[in-house]
Amino acid sequence: MNINKINILDLLIALICLVVIVALPPLGVMISFVIVILYLLVGKDRKQKLKSIGFTRPKSWLKTIFICLLLAIVIETSFQVFFNPIIEKLTTSKIDLSAYDNIRGNFPNYLIMLMVGWVVGGFIEEILFRGFLITRLLRLFTNTNTGNWFAIVLTSTVFGFSHLYQGWSGVISTGLIAALFGIIFIKNNKILWYSILTHGFVNVVGLTLIYLNLDKYLSSLILPW
């Protein structure tokens, strides 16, 4: 471990957030985000803190948006068609998406949920899990590769658990998707906009499929329940 490279306060806040998220799913995510955002915005060094979680401009916004949109389409459709049905078969339980039933065929509710998807998924969850938690946890290791994988696995596991309202199949599915967000974040030099945009677009694709009642159709293409 490399404690000297990490601010002890950063580490303490990260540990508190992990405990709160696990103890109070999904409310713990919002509580932890408030703790983190207050810490990031307080003090004269707030610009440096924001930069430390990945708020750096990408070289090309157009290219970044295109790449993230493409990644989101691939991730969401592959999980809908292939991975989620396999997870449901293995756990013998369906992913519980009943919380989103009110957007099926309902355009106003769909638009509201899209905004929620961007704010909560795209920004709040990415700032918390990828931007803050991953960057703090990986500093515990002198070996960068080990630190990266430890941070990705731990934060993805906790992220999945925060979606316990979707059942255990939902926990596994969202945890695996979170791992992909973590990899995208790390592979793009920890520029947070990549995971923010990818997560936001994943939510857009997923919510659109639910709105159009195509999610159940796609899930039954390869492995009928």
Image (cartoon, rainbow, N blue to C red):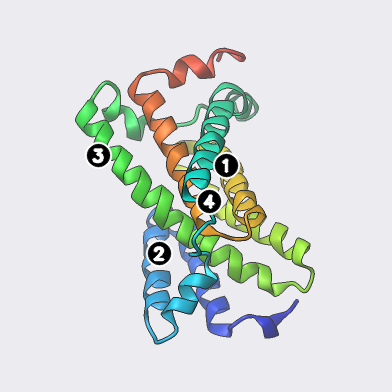
Quarter residue 200 falls in: top left
One can see residue 16 in this view: no
Q: Secondary structure at mark 3?
A: helix
- The local crowd at label 4, few if under 14, some if 14 to 19, many if 20 or more residues have their Cα within 10 Å, is many
Q: Amino acid at mark 3?
A: Ile
One can see residue 38 in this view: yes
Nearest to N terminus: mark 3 or mark 1: 3
- As displayed, is residue 104 above or below residue 193? above
Distance (Cα) linking label 1 and label 4: 14 Å
Q: Are marks 2 and 3 in contact (CB under 8 Å)?
A: no
Identify the residue under disc 3. Answer: 112
Identify the residue under disc 4. Answer: 194
Distance (Cα) linking label 2 and label 3: 21 Å
Q: Amino acid at mark 2?
A: Phe
Q: Residue 2 location, x and y as percent? A: 73, 79
The C terminus: image quadrant: top right
Q: Is residue 139 left or right of residue 163?
A: right
Quarter residue 78 falls in: top right
Q: Secondary structure at mark 2?
A: helix
Nearest to N terminus: mark 4 or mark 3: 3
Q: Nearer the viewer, residue 223 or 193?
A: 193
Distance (Cα) linking label 4 and label 2: 19 Å
Identify the residue under disc 1. Answer: 177
The N terminus: image quadrant: bottom right
